[in-house]
Image (cartoon, rainbow, N blue to C red):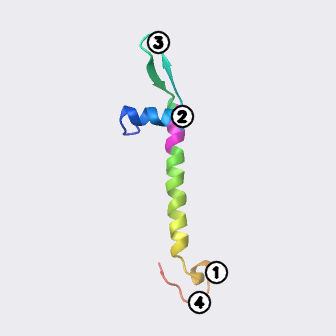
Amino acid sequence: MLGIEVPGVLSLVGEGRIRGVRVGPGQEWRIELDSVEDYLDDQAENVRRTALWEQSQAASFPELWGHGDVRHPD
């Protein structure tokens, strides 16, 4: 689901970004699906906000206020 190796997942657990516990006699890791989905949602939101920020940095004043010459017309 995450497309990363086990050490990467354990790093995310150690950082508290996803939740996991060791269970059983072999102390195998169990990772909560909800926490992985929450992590992926957070990552997608960060990408969305970064894209909006980059767009806002490229906007001209006329684009923002609706009058004057538009730098990047659609």
Q: Residue at x 61, y 78 (%)?
A: 64
Left-right relation of 15 to 67:
left
The amino acid on which the numbered mark 3 sits, given as a three-letter code, is: Gly
User: Which numbered marker is on residue 55?
Assistant: none
Q: Which residue is mark 3?
A: 24
Residue 53: name its quadrant. bottom right
Q: Which residue is mark 2?
A: 35
Which stretch is magenta?
34-40
- Disc nearer the start of the sequence (2/3): 3
Q: Quadrant of the N terminus?
A: top left
Residue contact at pointers 1 and 4, CB within 8 angstroms? yes
Residue contact at pointers 2 and 4, CB within 8 angstroms? no
Residue 3, percent from left and from top: 36, 40
Mark 1 and mark 3: span between their CA atoms?
A: 61 Å
Q: Residue at x 55, y 81 (%)?
A: 60
The amino acid on which the numbered mark 1 sits, given as a three-letter code, is: Trp
The amino acid on which the numbered mark 2 sits, given as a three-letter code, is: Ser
Q: Which residue is mark 4?
A: 68
Q: Residue at x 44, y 32 (%)?
A: 10
**Looking at the image, how many numbered discs can be counted on the residues?**
4
Q: Residue furthest top?
A: 25
By secondary structure, the bulk of the magenta-drawn segment is best described as helix
Query: Is residue 36 rendered magenta in the image?
Result: yes
